[in-house]
Each structure stands twice: as structure tokens, then as C-alpha cells.
Image (tube, rainbow, N blue to C red):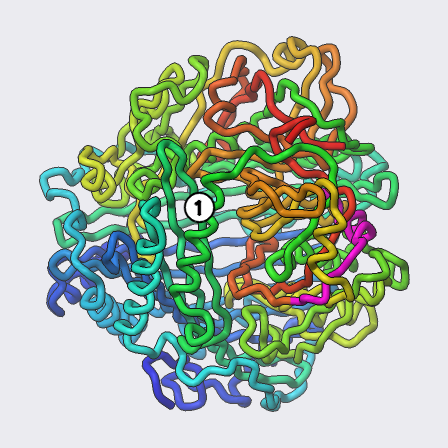
Amino acid sequence: MSAVDKEVAELIELGQSIVKRARGAGADVAEASVHGGSHLSVKVRMREPELVEEAGSRALGLRVMLGKRVASTYTSDLSKAGQQLLIEDALELAKLSEADEFAGPPDPSELSKPTQWADLDTFDDAVSEIAADEAMQRALDGERAAFDYDSRITNSEGASFTRARGMSALVTSGGFAGGDVGTYASVVVTPVADDEGGKKRRGYHWSAARHYAELESSRAVGQEAARRTLAQLGAKKLPTQELPVIFDKDAARSIVGLLAGCVLGGSIWRKSSYLVDRVGTQVASDLVTIIDDPLLVRGPGSRAFDGEGLISRRNIVVQDGKLQTYLLDTYSARKLGLQSTGSASRSSSGGISPSTSNLTLQPGTISRDDLVADTKHGLYVTGMMGFGFNSVTGDFSRGASGFLIENGELGHAVSEVTISLNLDQLLQRIDAVADDIDHRTSIASPTFRVASMTLAGT
Amino acid sequence: MTGRYHAPFAEHGSHAIDADIANRLLRIALGQGGDYADLFFEYSVSGSYAYDEQILRSARRAVSMGLGVRVMKGDATGYAYCEELSFDAMKRAAETAAQIAAGGKPHSPVGVTLRELPDRYPIAVESIDVDGAAKKAILERADRAARAADSRVIRVDASLAEGVREILVANSLGHMARDRQPMMRFGVRVIAQDGDNRQSGSSGGGGRLGLEYFDDRAPEWHAEQAVKQALVMLDAREAPAGEMDVVLGPGDSGILLHEAVGHGLEADFNRKNTSNYSNRIGEEVASALCTVVDDASLPGSRGSINVDDEGLLPTRSVLIEDGVLRGYMQDRHSADFFKTTPDGHGRRESFRSHPMPRMTNTMLLAGQDDPEDIIRSVSRGVYAKKFGGGQVDISNGDFVFSLTEGYLIEDGKLTAPLKGVNLIGNGPDAMRKVEMLGHDFEISDGIWTCGKDGQSVPVGVGCPTIKISAMTVGGTQVGGG
């Protein structure tokens, strides 16, 4: 048994003991989630070490039911007294809750078995072995590459390197016991350049991977961060107008993220999504297909089983623009009279709700450069700011920065404008999807173009 | 002591930490040559109750406990934490943090003595110690009032979150302080539907207060506000797009100030010369009408603290006075750099994180104008009443805010409610364009949480009615509106 397997076995054992004691104290249903992990974070600034942080931690989450009454508790105090309080509090709170006819774990026959779990290759020993010196060097290299790239990079908000390993266990009184492990390494560089009028421009770039060998070199990350910072120099507002908008893959990803929130079962039965009653209807242009795939090998959001112990499966959420399904856990499925899609996620504090795993807007066939070249006049968005999205109505309006596109070429930098359009219309107006995609993030999208949006500026 | 939840490191706790243990750990922390160290013990209990569809659907509680040890050598920080309070575990954390200064000569910390603190949390009984049935009753009242208010209300979600955070800070300057920081936050959100048109509205508040908060602000009042907002939004029209005059309502609009100005005045960005306010003390950075302060001492306010998370005492900091930049918000490290007195702005999310300069209650003080006159002075513009949130890029001051309730101003009167409005601008630029300031200063009810570098802390904001000439309004209606 490897060291990490042994640690997971310990977490499962702790979970089993908590479930047993909670049942003994009167809980009809008891579910324990146990988390353990450690991380090293190193930050440098102006070529000097700024922070070295190292720690490990463990925590316990418990969810109980008394009849149909639900409560959950969490503690990072794993002492005997801490565990006792966790169980007592859970039962006391469950007595206060009121019966919820839809509450309850999945039928035991639906629970997945260890033999069904896919090996998603999310753990890499090489990540946990990275020493502080090496981490420091990685961060220093990243920042130096940014400074060396161009003399106009005069300042820095620093560069950081983080490695983390985490493991978790889920044990339920319905008979499920499973563990999950993962590692993660990342490097971020944030250079600063001086612009006119005393303004400064800050840009950043980052790389992250589950396996150490897949992490981009610090040098490449630093250079790209510098390039992005300098590209913003001289940014100007634009006059208010309607125009085509291209979202680069980082900005596009956050649009897909807004849609993600609106297809989760909880937002549907709470009626806080504009996509209520829209399954089977057109919710995006026919160029748009969006898939949630928990089984992506080495994916940032991968999971072999879901937060209730159901087997993970690939869900096509939107196909050729048509909404195929919501993402559901057992509870929201029951509320809506549907079946779980194996999308339950259990928070460390014990609550369960549906979540996306690796949600990807599928790439098209045109290259990003051809897409820009195909746009006579438009806005190329690289960054967005603010929280201007109303999930109930789909109204969307956010601050945007990026570049003016003129005659198929990127022109001057743009900032201090907003772009607005209801998300429903925004997705329907997507008239081109590029082929550039990466899976650094659990929600991913290629660059795409929206035929027309409102830009508010001067 | 009464109540169920007490820190194990409290004076009579199971793992009581006294000056002697603190001194021993600080000595270990400085054993490798660090020039400053602090210990941050934290025991935090939080609870939440969610009520909807006429049942208390879920109740939660969480306990989080541990020690964070920080060691500094020059500008470099070593940080480690542990979640058990055995001496061995604490010693290991101190040794790990000490490594930042590896190879240096051991420093001796100044022996710690306990500080006397003010009491800014006027609470009879902490919410967390009140019987759950009382909290359920409050949520039921809100639910009932919201459903009774209008037949178009199709959904009500009421929630109450409560917590208490007990801390013990000891630092190598010789300060030691214990504080018990309570918090309560209530909110109600409704969805109203008319035909196919569905809109939401919300209202909430709280602070470092107990359930007596509801004596002044009944749950029914919040329910009615939320319903009113949702109904107003049912009639809302698309917002105009482009530059125009903007009037910000009192209280809640302070969040704009928090983002547009506050973050840029946190001393760490200025020490690093990455803020657009860097090296500008003494310069005119806002209209002469503007005086901005950050004040941790308001009794019961969400952002108030008796002591900061470095063991230092917060003072009222004047940031901008009559338009002139006077100072930044300091933590110990930045105060050293600027050779000024630390003013107690060193805050952190938890024992798992190192402190940074953070805001407490950030306020733009009252002016002389009648709020009615301010609205009357605008021929075409937007009135911002409630905000959903905002964000700033501190390097250049560009900010964005989204409104959850806003109105068109036409010929000096509030007319149509607007949907999907964003305000975008630049902090220093907007502050120079402050043309009128009301005499109606208000503190926003306690709902705001501020995020920085991945760390969240509760904050307060406040301001009077403010008129800003020419701000970009991000709607969808080009030209008309």
C-alpha cells in the first residue's frame, strides 16, 4: 500500500467511526466526509522571497438525518471533544430542522462500487516532493523572465508557486465508503508596467497541472505575463456602440461559468435561473455544444464518483444549441421529478448540491487568428470585471478590457467600458467558435464571437 | 462564563495559553534570526439556518480552530499553522515558520503582556448561544410577511448566519490580546413573477450584534423591502448606455467608495508602488468636498474590531481630507516601511492566512446638500440605490459595480426603474467628479464581505447621497433610453 493509499484508508476509518457513533446517538442517516491535505506556497517579489507558507490540515464534515430532518456540521478540531461536539451539534440541529419530504440519500442499489471507479490519474508523487528551494527557484525564474522580457516591466506584484496534495473520504450509513486523492502545482506571475497619466497596468499569466511534468516552464509563464501586461499600455475607452465581440478563451470561460450556474438543479427548483422549463429548447446558437465530463484524465475537476457515491458520468448539457439536461444531485432530481445525473458535490462543511466537474464548451474548427481576421470591426475581450449578472433574468453587463479589432487586426488596448446583453441572447448570437482550448481550469471554453453586443463607453 | 462555545486556548480552557507559553513559542519562532514573529490563535464557530417553502430546510454549524505562526525577516514572511494545540504541534509550526530566516542569529522577543481592549460589540447574548427556535421564528416571520405582501411573490428564501470568533494574538513586540468577535447576518430574497417576467429582490443586514438587531429592523421590514424591490424590477426597463450624471444613494453606495478608493489606499500596494495612489500623500486626489475615513470603532458595525489580527489597536484613520490624500491604512510591516504608527489595519481571514492591510468601516463623510436638491440638479442620469457588488483593479483604479436597484433620473425626478445596470469608472477620476454631497450620511446595514488575495473579511461602508458628474453607465440602450 502506498503512503497516500494508507492515508486515505485512515480517513475512511475515521469516517466509519463517526458514522457509527452518529448512528449510535440516534441519527437515522449519517454521512461523514473527511478531508486531509498539505500545501507549500512560495511567493517572491522584486527578485526576493516574500512568503513561504507550509502546513497540513484535516477536517471532518457530518450530515445527519432524523427522519426527514437534515442538519450538517463541520470541525477542524479532531480531538475527542471536538468529534463529540460535531455529533451532538448535528443531532441537536436536526431536531430543529423541519421534515423535508425530498431529503434522503440515494437508494443503496444506486451506489457505485470500487471496481467501477475509473483511474483518473489525478495524483502525482512528484508534486508532493517539491521542496521549498525548488519552489522558490520556480517562482524567481517566472518573475525574472517577466523583467527580462522588456524594460518597460518596471514593477511586480510578484510571482508565486504552489504545490498542494489533498485527499478525502466519504462514508455513508447507506453503505458507501470511498476515497479520492489529488495533487496540484501552479505558477503565477503578475508584472506591472507604468502607463500614461500615472496609471499602472497589471497583467498576469499562470499555469497549473495535476502532474508536475505538465506544468509550463516558469520562463514561458513569465514571458506571457509580461506580454499581456505591456499589451494593455495606452488603453482607451471607446464610444458607446453596438458591435461584434470576441471573447478570448479566458473571458469565454467566465461566460460558460455563468451558464453553468443556471443549469444546476438547485437554481432550477429555486426558480433562480432563467433556464427554468427550458430543457429541449434552443438556449444557444447551433455552434454550441457543452459537455460536463468528470472522467477527464488528469482533469482539474475530475471525480470517479460523486458526492453521494453515485458513479460519475459524462453529461451532454447543451448539444448544437439545445439544452439537453440540468445537472442534478439526488435531492434536486427528486424535487424536479427527474433522475440524478451523478453531479452531487459535497462541500467540506457537509452540505450537498449539484456542481459541474469539467465543463467544456466544445472547440470549433476555425483558428483564433482566423476568427480575428474574419472580424472587420469589433471588440476583442481578454478580461472582465464586476458581478453584473442576474441569474433569474439572464441580464448580463460587465466591465470589459481588451482590444479594438479593426479590419481583421487587433488594434489599441481598450479599458473602462462595459458590455451588455442578456445571456440567453448572447449565447444565441455566437456566430463562430475557435479551436483553441486548454484544460487548466475545470470550466473551459475556446475563443468565440458574439455577433453583436452593446458596448457602453464615452 | 456561559454558553456552549469557548476557545480551548482561553484562560480556563482545556489548552489554556498564557504569557509563558506564548513567550516560549515566540522564542522558538525567532530562533533562526527572524526579526518579528506573531502567534494567532483562533477558535471560530459559525452557524447558518435556511428557511424556504415554509420549512427550516437546513441548519449548519462549523467549528474551526488552530494556531498560525508568522515570522518575518525584512520583507520576507514565513508562515505555518497547526490545528491541534499540543505543545509539540505548536512548536513544529513555530520551527517551520522560523525557517524563512534560516541561518541567522536568534533574536529575543519582548516578553508579552495582556492588553486592555475597548468593547465595540454591544451584545447581551450572542446569537450562537440563543435557542434555535428563536431564530427559526425570525425566519418564519420574514417568510410570512414576504408571501403576504403580494400575490406575485412565488418564492421566498430567508437565512440567518451567525458566528463568534475568539482570538488570542501575541507578538514579539510584547503585545498580547484576547478578543471575542461575534457576528450576525440576516437576509431575505424573494422572486416575483408576472406572466413570463420573473425578477428577484433582496434585503438584509446585521453586524456585531445579537438578535436585538431585530428590535429596530424587524424581519418583516426586510421582507417588505425585498418584495418592493422585486416588484419594482418587474416594471424595469433596459438601462441606457453611455456617459451621464450618476447620483448614488446614501449608505449602500459606500461599497463604491470601498472599491474605487479604499483598496488603493491599503498600504501594502503603496509600499510596493503598485497602487495608483502610490507616492501621492499631500496631493489633491478627490473633489474638495470629500473626506474619507476608515474607523474600526463604530459600536456593533460589521467592520468593527477591538484589536487587529496582529495584536495592534485600530485608530480612526483619515485617508482623504477635503480632497487631499493624508495617509494609507497600515499594518505593522507597512507602518515600519513608511516610518509611521501602525493603525490597526492588519487583518486576516483565519489562522490559516497571514495578515494584510485591510479596511474596517470605510466612510465618505456627510456634505451640506439636501438630497432632494441633488436629484433635482440632474436633467438626465441614473440614481443608484442598491448594489450587488463591485471590483477594482488597484493598479489603475478602474472599477465596476452592478446595481440591484436603480432608477432613471429625468428632469430632476426619479422615473423608471432600470434593469441590468453597471457603473464603470476610475476611482481617482470619479472622486474628482463628486459635485454634490448630501447631509444624509448613513452606514450601510451589515452585509458586506471584502475579498483580497483570496482572503475574505467582514467590512462596513457608509456615505451620504453623492452626485458624480459623467460616469459610464453600462446598459443596453444606445442613444435613447
In the image, is residue A247 part of the stretch drawn in magenta? no
Q: Chain of mark 1?
A: B
Residue A90 in the figure: left or right of residue A368: left
Identify which residue is drawn at 31% across, 56% down.
B148
Residue span colored magenta? B425-441
Callout 1, which amino acid?
Answer: Leu
Identify which residue is drawn at 54% across, 39% down.
B419
Question: Residue B249: x percent and y percent?
Answer: 64, 56
Residue B288 in the figure: left or right of residue B183: right
Quadrant showing the C terminus of chain A: top right
In this rendering, is residue B391 above or below A259? Answer: below
Identify which residue is drawn at 45% across, 16% down.
A285
Question: Residue B202: x percent and y percent?
Answer: 45, 53
Count of numbered labels shown in the rendering: 1
Question: Residue A1: x percent and y percent?
Answer: 27, 47
Report the front residue among A270 and B41.
Answer: A270
Residue B177 in the figure: left or right of residue A315: right
Q: Which residue is mark 1?
A: B231
Residue A142 in the figure: left or right of residue B95: right
* Label 1: element kind: helix
In this rendering, is residue B353 above or below A336? Answer: below
In this rendering, is residue A323 above or below A191? Answer: above
Name the image quarter holding residue A349.
Answer: bottom left
Name the image quarter holding residue B19.
Answer: bottom right
Question: Residue B280: x percent and y percent?
Answer: 87, 58
